Image (tube, rainbow, N blue to C red):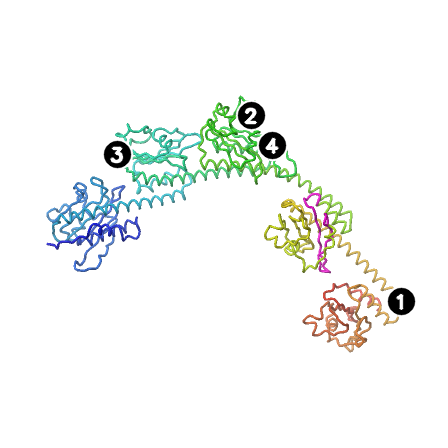
Amino acid sequence: MHDKLTFPPLSELTQRLTTGVTERGNLAEMLLHITREAQDVFLPDLCLLTAYHPITGDFHYARILYREDPSSSAQPQPQTPLPNQNPLHASLAQKLDETQMGLLCIPDLNTTPTYQSESLHREKVQALGAIALQKGAGRPHFGVLLLAFRQSRNFSSEEQEVLRQFALMASFILQETWLLQRYREITHIGQIINQEVTSVETLLQTLHPLIQNVLDTRHALMLAIHQAPTHTRDLYGIDEGNYIREDNRAPAGASRYVLQERTSVLIQHWQEEKQNHPFRIAHVQGTAPKQSFIYVPLLMGDIPIGIFSIQHPQPHAYTQEDVAILEILANHITLAINNIRLYDSLLQLNEIGRLLTSQIELQYPLQATLKKILSATGAETVLLYPTLASHTVYDTAPLQPLIEGVPLLSHLSNESFWSWQDSVTEKMASQQQTLFEPECASTRERLLHDIRPILTQEGIKSLAIMPLHVEQEAVGVLSLFFQQTQYFDTPQKLLIEGLAHFAAIAIRNAQTFNGLLQRRIHELEILQRIDKELNSSLSLEAILASLLRNACAFVPAEGAIILLQDSKKQTLETRAAYGPNAEYYLRFKTPISEVRGLTGWVLHYKQPVCVNNVHRDSPWNRFYVGVAPNTTSELAIPLLDGGQAIGVLNFESSREGAFRQEDQDFLQTLAGQAVLAITKAQAYEREKRLAGERQVLYDISKELTSQLDPQKVFELILEKALELMKEKSRTGCLMRYDRERQRLWMAAERGVLPDKKGSGHSVNEGIVGQVARTKQLLNVDPSQPGWKDIYLSYIRDTRSELAVPMVANGELKGYSISKVRRKRPLMRVMSVSCAAWQIWQ
């Protein structure tokens, strides 16, 4: 005997079953949830829920809950699932299929031991109630809920009715879970085929084992790929384990119907339904007869690219639910095929790109390119009509139209055909969009209106006309003619337009090469002329003026200057200028530390700068310092002698973007030539100066040899040393060295303070003492740290001191000192003093 159970209302039971699951579509979690609710409602000693695969019918999963202590309120704990064996006896499942409503109640298993399984016997089960979870009466079940009791008992009608209602709701929930799991699996399959499959040949082989748990594909699976250029289909299939392949066949029967109507077709029993369909099932060699079919179109947008089909020898093998799942899978297959086609297009584009870059001459690569385009697109005829590009100022030879494939418009005169083609080229060259015309016979395109009847007579059903542009500049027109109607889907359009881009690049490359070749010849002529003028003159100003004049005749500049550093003065000066602002620029002279603008940046970083718009282009607009009000674009080139910047070559224009890369390259070459000329001229000036200094030394030697008075000799040496310094210094003194006393005394002076005249000091004192000890020249600022502590003042307001030791045969005789009232003087060569001393000695 058992206590009578109190069951919850149906609404509460429904809510409990449909809530409390964290992840819908998780079969294991859902089975556990249903089992727990059954345990709570019916209080069996053992609650068992088994799940069967809805496609194969095989045992899939099981959940078992035990009620260890009937008086305990603790929640029963789930046991480990049994995925590898079915705990129910096979006869029990068979009896459930035969029983009306799929319910079986056994009060005492001892009287019906047939349904006793090893698992139930081990748990000492005496009574059980079992019900099938299925879509409807008479349909195969996909689960069994079993309530087992260890004591014999009867099942009241109320218990049976509640159990039926519970099973009905559990069936719906479990069916939904299976469906969600199938959808998840479809998504996973889509990811695999789109990431791993690279060819249509391997697509079906990869797909077949993956979808067997989602759809019943044990008997037949077919994939037909539509070839739009030829209006044929390539068939890939697996029928009863045999691989099927048919190429270049015209679509027929159900396949043609699905392609044309772009709709899915479900056939549940062909033998009974065939009279109701407007098509027949076309026989494929090597396949067995079937009764159940699903055909799904593969659509990229509204364009069919193929058909996917599953087939079964038994009737009523598929449902609308299977159609919905197959349509989702078809979307993934469509995307995979589209990716494969894009990949194939990329390979073809790569092949043509390799071909185009293998040769530089124009005619032969283009003809080979047309053959590749003809083969890749499936067109009957390809026509390339180049135009003369205007991107270079140098004329190139006119290009001839090229044709590949079947000759078209044979009955038209050449004049008529090329007149139409000239009109097409003129109109299309100003457009950016490609003209794709799938139906020439019914076209409303004005461009094709006059030639439409001729195209129809020639059998041309579709055509594509592509303007060829490079950087918004028209370089030609490419036309493709097809004798089969084309859909012009996205991959086909991308392939055609990609091929057209390569053809445009090939034309531009050849034209650019020819233009650059002529430019380089002209550059060489200018460089040779400049080199000739440089070798004929040693005047730096004349050399730089000639260089600017020749450069501006070639580069589109309205003004140019050459700025050079004066390392002694530490300034940047304009040494040559050209253009309307030349007179103003020639007055430019500024300290190196104060140089700003683009010129300062180029001088500092030793890199060229080309700015299309100095007022707008960032970051150069922040550096730009306006001098000429109409300057818009600027090109500055550093003059580099080894790794040292010695100046800047600067060109300006009022036009935006006036300078190109080839202008920069030419001027960098010219800058190198200018540096050679500058160093050559500076070397000449230096030799000229040294020759003058040698003459001064010669004059001093003549005067010294005529003098016998030592005091006058000392004054003469100091006077000549100060003459060499010119404006840099007018004050100084000559100190004699007394070796025995280790002192220095003043032998001659100019501008010395009155109380310091004739004075002296130890060699251990002052800047002069350090020079005496080290016998090394010093040119220092006595106000700076390190020097002001030892400085001895002889001349008022001294800002710089230049001390030169006078050494004869390695022995110190004295030193010459020049005091300068400037903060940063430039040192002159003071060794004349030493030479003069040696001459007098």
Tag 3 residue: 315
Which secondary structure, mark 3?
loop
Foreground: disc 3 or disc 1: 3
Tag 2 residue: 417
Alpha-carbon distance for marks 3 and 1?
Answer: 138 Å
Q: Position of residue 259 (x, y in %)?
A: 38, 32
Q: Quadrant of the N terminus?
A: bottom left
Tag 4 residue: 399
Which secondary structure, mark 4?
loop
Foreground: disc 4 or disc 2: 2
Q: Earlier in the sequence, mark 1 or mark 2?
A: 2
Callout 4: 10 Å neighbours few (<14), some, many (20+)? some
Q: Looking at the picture, which amino acid does disc 4 mark?
A: Leu
Question: The magenta stretch spans which residues?
Answer: 552-581
Residue shown at 67% from the left, 71% from the top = 785
Foreground: disc 4 or disc 1: 4
Q: Looking at the picture, which amino acid does disc 1 mark?
A: Ser
Q: Looking at the picture, which amino acid does disc 2 mark?
A: Phe
Callout 3: 10 Å neighbours few (<14), some, many (20+)? some
Quadrant in the rendering for residue 287: top left
Reply yes or no: does residue 556 show up in magenta: yes
Q: Nearer the viewer, residue 17 or 476?
A: 17
Q: Position of residue 839 (x, y in %)?
A: 84, 66
Instruction: Return the residue found at the far top.
Output: 411
Proximity of marks 4 and 3: CB atoms separated by less than 8 Å: no
Q: Which mark is residue 706?
A: 1
Alpha-carbon distance for marks 4 and 3?
Answer: 67 Å
Q: Position of residue 81 (x, y in %)?
A: 25, 52
Q: Position of residue 606 (x, y in %)?
A: 64, 54
